[in-house]
Amino acid sequence: MAHESMIRFRVDDGSGLPIYRQLIDQVRQAIQLGFLRPGDQLPTVREVVRQVAINPNTVHRAYRDLEIQGLVKGRQGQGTFVVGTLGGPTPVAQGSLRQAMERWVRSARQAGLDEEGMQAILKAALHKVEEEG
Amino acid sequence: MLALEARDLGRRYPRKWGLRNCSFAIPEGKVAGLVGPNGAGKSTLLRLAAGISRATTGEVRVLGEAVRPNCPGGYPKVGYLDQERPLYKHFRVEELLKYGQHLNRQWYPDVARRWLDELHVPVAARFRSLSIGQQAQVALALCLGKQPELLLLDEPAASLDPLARRKLFGALMDTVADRGTTVFLSSHILSELEPVCDYLVILSNSEVQLSGETERILANHRILVGPREQAAPEGGTVIATANAGRQTTLVVRDLAHRSVGWQEIEPTLEEIVLAYLEVGQ
C-alpha cells in the first residue's frame, strides 16, 4: 500500500445510515465536489476494510451500486475506476458558490446566529424559492 | 457448504446448563457475530465448536465434519482464540511463533510474521512487555499462522482501546477479503460487531434466541407504536412489548401485512437484539 488513496472513507456509527450507503454517499459527494474525477481509482476492497474495519461485502455492495449508477466501473484484475460525473455546477462554479456561502455564514455568526438558526434560515429560503417556482 | 452447524447442541455443567437446545448454521465465508450478555454461554459454545469441551447433547459440525473433543492432531483448518489468550508471558514473540510452528501440522511462518510486521509488533520483545493491543495481535497471529478456513474468536477485542480494536478488526477483515475465511467471533458489545458482521447469533440465558443474516434480520423485524388498549396485529410474532402511558411499543417479527392503527418503524439492529435479550431474561 505504497500509493495514496484517492478517497478516504469514514464510517459514522451514529448516523443511522447503513454503512454501504455511507460509502456511496461519500463517493458521490467527492465526485460532485470534483475531488474524484473520471479515471481516478477507488481504493481496493482490501485497502478499505483494513482502514475502516468493516465487512468486505459492504464495500463490494457499495461499489456494485455505484457501478449500477454509472459512476464507477470495475476492471478485472485492475480495480474500480471513476467513469461518470454528476450533474450540477462545475467545480469552479461550486468553489465561488461556497465562498459566497462562507461569507454569509460569517456575517450570520457576527449577527449572533448559531448553526440551528442558520439552518432554519436556509430551509426557509429554499422553501420560498421553491414556492416561487 | 456450511462452515459451522449446531444441532440440538447442549452442555451441562454440574449445577446448570451452560448451553442448551442450540441449533443454527453459519454458511461459509460469513463473518458471524455471537452476541449476548456475560454468562450467556458464548464461551461454552465456542469451546464446543473448537473441540475443547464435550457436548452433553446433540452435535456440532465444523466444515462438514462432526467435532470430536481431543481429536488427535487437532483441527488444522480451525483456528481458536481463547478469551484468556493463554500464552507464555515470558516468551519472546518470535519464540511464540516458533512454538506455534511446532504445535501445528500445518503452519505458514510468513503469514504470522507478515501480520505482526504490518502492525509494527516487535517480534524480539517479550510477550508480557507488549501493550494489550499488541498482545491481542500476537494471539491472533498465532491463530492465523495455520491459515485456517474457520476462525473461532472469543472476545478478541475485549479490553482494547478503539484504535487497537480498529487495527485488529481491520487486519482481520483484510484476511477475510483476501482468503474468504469464515469468522465466528463473540462480544457482549453489539456496536463492536455490527460493522464487521454479516451474520448474527443472539445468545441469552444459555439458548439461541435468533440467528441469521443481519440484512434479513433487519428486513424481518418492525417496531409498531399504537394505542395501549389495541390488540396486537395478526400475522406476525410479537417479540417484546413495552407499555408507557397510553402507548404500546411492540417489536414484531415477520409482519405479514401493513397493520392498521399502528405506526410502523424500521428498527436498528441494536433495538432488535435488545428485544431478544430481554425475552431470554
Image (cartoon, coloured by chain):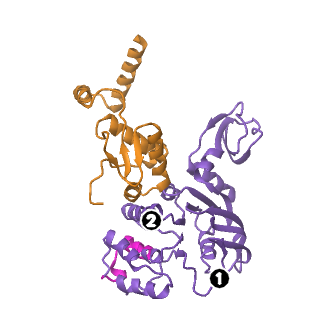
Chain colours: A orange, B purple
Task: Give residue B221's position: percent from left, percent from top.
Answer: 65, 45
Q: Is residue A21 left or right of residue A40?
A: right
Q: Nearer the viewer, residue B86 or B25?
A: B25
Disc 2 residue type (three-letter): Thr
Q: Is residue B174 above or below residue B132?
A: above
Q: Which residue is mark 2?
A: B175
Residue B125 in magenta stretch = yes
Q: Which residue is mark 1?
A: B69
Question: Looking at the rendering, which quadrant does residue A97 occupy?
Answer: top left
Question: Looking at the rendering, which quadrant does residue B100 occupy?
Answer: bottom left
Query: Residue at (35%, 34%) from the top-left corner?
Result: A85
Which contiguous range is marked in magenta? B124-140
Residue B248 tag number? none
Chain letter for mark 1: B
Q: Residue furthest front?
A: A76
Disc 1 residue type (three-letter): Pro
Q: CA distance from mark 2 to mark 1?
A: 27 Å
Task: Give residue B2's position: percent from left, percent from top.
Answer: 64, 65
Q: Nearer the viewer, residue A94 or A68?
A: A68
Q: Is residue B275 above or below residue B90?
A: above
Q: Earlier in the sequence, mark 2 or mark 1?
A: 1
In what quadrant of the picture does the C terminus of chain B appear? bottom right
SS class of the residue under badge 2? Answer: helix
Specify few, some or many for label 1: CA neighbours under 10 Å numbering under 14, 14-19, or 20 or more: some
Specify few, some or many for label 2: CA neighbours under 10 Å numbering under 14, 14-19, or 20 or more: many
Q: Nearer the viewer, residue B147 or A111?
A: B147
Task: Give residue A87's position: percent from left, percent from top.
Answer: 36, 28
Query: Residue at (44%, 41%) from the top-left corner?
Result: A66
Q: Is residue A79 left or right of residue B154?
A: left
Residue A117 in magenta stretch = no
Query: Residue at (56%, 46%) from the top-left corner?
Result: B268
